[in-house]
Image (cartoon, rainbow, N blue to C red):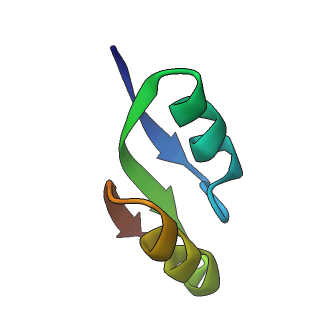
Amino acid sequence: MLRAKSYFSGAGGMDLGMLGAGIEIIESYEIDTVACETLRNNFKHQLLLI
């Protein structure tokens, strides 16, 4: 299985697509606090607010 980090994640649309393609997301990086709340509610991987 491929593993990746997600930069400028937003609400996680690309993360969801990568998961559907069989790529494991190990970390997401985001600056928007509202987007971070969405990511926390929908994904289990580590999230870093930058």
* Depicted 25 relative to depicted 8: above or below: above
- The residue drawn where x is 36% and y is 65% is 48
Viewer-side residue, 43 vs 46: 43
- Of all residues shown, which one is farthest toward the top? 1
- Screen quadrant of the N terminus: top left
In the figure, residue 10 lies in which quadrant?
A: bottom right
Q: Nearer the viewer, residue 44 or 49?
A: 44
Q: From the viewer's perspective, is 29 left or right of 11?
A: left
Residue 45, relative to residue 6: is it above or below? below
Residue 33 x/y as whole percent: 55, 85
The total of numbered circles placed on residues is 0
- Observer-nearest residue: 38 or 27? 38
Answer with the quarter of the image where residue 18 lies. top right
The quadrant of the picture occupied by the C terminus is bottom left
Residue appearing at x 43%, y 60% in the figure: 43
Residue depicted at 58% across the width and 30% down the height? 20
- Taking the view exactly as shown, the residue that stands out farthest to the front is 20
Residue at x-position 51% and y-position 82%? 37
On the image, the x and y values in percent for residue 16 come to 60, 44
